[in-house]
Amino acid sequence: MFLSGCITALATPFSGSGSLDLDAWRDLLKQQLRSGVQGVVVAGSTGEAAALSDEEYLTLIREAVQVVAGAVPILAGTGQMNTARTIAQTRLAAEAGAQIALVVTPPYVRATQAGLVAHYRAVADEGGLPVVLYNVPGRTGCDLLPETVAELIDHPGIIGIKEARSEPERMKALLALRREGFAVLSGDDGTASRAMLAGADGLISVGANAMPVAFRRLCDLSRAGEAAQATQWDAGLAEFYTFLGIEPNPIPVKALLQRLGFGQGLRLPLLPLSQGHAELADRLVAQLVVLEEQSSREPLAA
């Protein structure tokens, strides 16, 4: 299974009482499918995985499997702080019907590069799902280096990497390693167009929760090498990129989703968007509704 294009790292909708809002979850999934996204991530960091019980985790995946019905790949966030727990979580995701495990480097423990090689090989061998590596050192305190990826890339159970570092040199180094069947995906909305114009296969996006059509178009233009159009479209999203980083993810994107009718908030220790940013969120929601309508008039790439 080769991953490419616009893949949404889904936020998890909650009700006003803090429970899962499964109606909003199904609606969000259906909207993503209608909008042409090419994959979804369930219970990643944007989905507040650390705040979910095992039963909630299983429920989200099972509901996604029913709604998506094979239309696009379903990735499940399974990365934990040690290898045994990551294998167990990956098996849990497989049991619920996920097709791919998105496995972040173990947070907080700061494994060595040799430890990361052993970790990922064990998860790929024993977890029961194909693995996409996930590097986001700003969250984990651990950087999966390109030379370490080079040791993992030939494992048949490791099928890609989500790279959230934004430096062009990092993406260039990863693209030089690429083999058939191994996808290199950007994990940073604001630099994804540049990465795809350089040869990256797609984007695992936060912003696509609220703007799936616009982000699908960004991916289509960038992957097709339409540099002038992609750069222009990317510039039109710049204010949204800034807003999505104004407070820790997923606080800003969930503020947009709440205004669009998808859920009510977050779980502690995350708090809703600061009131000082509310007016900006209101303005951006009005803009994104227009931009989504504009985007929907453009044909999707085959």
Image (cartoon, rainbow, N blue to C red):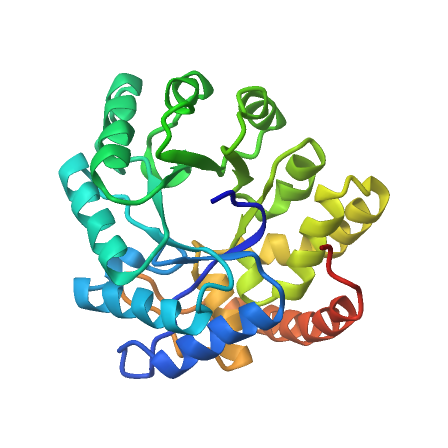
Question: Residue 188 is drawn in which quadrant?
Answer: top right
- Name the residue at 19% across, 42% down: 87
Asked if residue 3 is positioned above or below residue 123 in the image, the reply reads below
Nearest the viewer among 27 and 64 is 64
Give percent across and percent down for residue 108.
24, 36
Asked if residue 145 is positioned above or below residue 55 in the image, the reply reads above
Give percent across and percent down for residue 43.
34, 58
Question: Residue 236 is drawn in which quadrant?
Answer: bottom right
Asked if residue 5 is positioned above or below residue 71 in the image, the reply reads above
Q: Which residue of the protein is positioned furthest toward the right in this rendering? A: 228
Left-right relation of 30 to 96: right
Give percent across and percent down for residue 66.
38, 72
- Name the residue at 76% across, 50% down: 235
Q: Which residue of the protein is positioned furthest toward the left in this rendering? A: 84
Asked if residue 103 is positioned above or below residue 67 in the image, the reply reads above
- Name the residue at 26% across, 78% down: 19
Left-right relation of 50 to 138: left
Q: In what quadrant of the picture does the C terminus appear?
A: bottom right
Nearest the viewer among 66 and 215 is 66
Give percent across and percent down for residue 135.
41, 35
Left-right relation of 166 to 146: right
- The number of discs equals 0
Question: Residue 122 is drawn in which quadrant?
Answer: top left
- Name the residue at 32% across, 64% down: 61
